[in-house]
Amino acid sequence: MAISFRKVEHNYKGLKKNDFVAALHNINLDIAKDDEFVAVVGQTGSGKSTLVSHMNALLLPTSGEVKIFDYIITPKKRKNPKLKPIRKRIGFVFQFPEYQLFEETVLKDIMFGPKNFGIKEEEAKTKALQAAKLLGISDELLTKSPFNLSGGQMRKVAIAGILAYNPDILLLDEPTRGLDPKTASEVMAIFNKINKEYHKTIIVITHDMNLVYKYANRVIGMKDGQIHFDGKPLDLFSSNIYKECHLAKPDILALVDYLNLKMDLNLGYDIYSEEELLKRLKDVTK
């Protein structure tokens, strides 16, 4: 396994000196290096961001053990500076990664990640150009200041900077928040391609259940700092567990429910798009 949690607890300091707020409790979890597309979901304060922040050692456990590839992190490792190799293998795309842009040109900004991890200039440039092409960033934009781009373009540049150093696993925090529907769809199509064609594991924090149902092959539902559900999206939304995690039902499944009720149908939940739904309707109404 690429990432393993064993009896992990994490506490934040409270307002008073000896006060602590429990954010994670008794977390046991395994995530593979390849082929997983994991959605981490739950209401605000459920522990999902704290959980994912342990996956590349942005946060360290209060107790228990996190193993990231061959590197074991315990509370005793808190002052260990050798965390850079972990962050090279586990790339974190923050919720608004465009806030991290700072270089003079788009190309230099994309090159920063590879150079920061010791890749030489020419190779870093090659990797940056490959990442830019994958994200659909035109050659014309590469010479521009990243601060003269649209919000969607800035988001793509920031993501390209992560992809350029080719991490083994990608962590994504609300990757489509603030994007228009077209750009959001383009960004998710890229991550889906990386997962399907390059077999990289993708781990995404999201409140968007439509995204979860369309792309994820595994859902981790957080509630009160604990893992309340770990399984397939179909199993989550076919039960009442999604309500226990305070989640909405994906739009396509809500539509299936409505049609089943109004038309006395028995459509299953293995429908992931409007096109599939229309085809199923034609089949059952022949």
Image: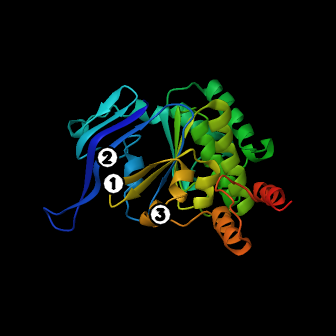
Residue 132 in view (yes/no)? yes
Sort mark 2 into few (<14), some (14-19) or many (20+) by Cα contacts within 10 Å: some
| Element assignment for label 1 | strand
Amino acid at dot 1: Gln
Of callouts 2 and 3, the N-terminal one: 2
* Viewer-nearest of discs 3 and 1: 3
Sort mark 1 into few (<14), some (14-19) or many (20+) by Cα contacts within 10 Å: many
**Label 1, on which residue?**
226
Question: Residue lying furthest right in this view?
Answer: 286
The quadrant where residue 254 appears:
bottom right
In-front residue for pair 90/207:
207
| Element assignment for label 3 | loop
Q: Is residue 218 left or right of residue 10?
A: right
**Label 2, on which residue?**
27
Q: Residue 171: horizontal and vertical position, in percent?
A: 50, 44
Q: Going 53% across and 33% down the picture, which residue do you hit?
A: 167
Colour pattern: rainbow
Q: Going 71% across and 59% down the picture, which residue do you hit?
A: 150
Q: Residue 117: horizontal and vertical position, in percent?
A: 49, 30
| Mark linked to residue 217 | none
**Label 3, on which residue?**
240
- Marks 2,1: beta carbons within 8 A: yes
* Viewer-nearest of discs 2 and 3: 3
Q: Quadrant of the C terminus?
A: bottom right
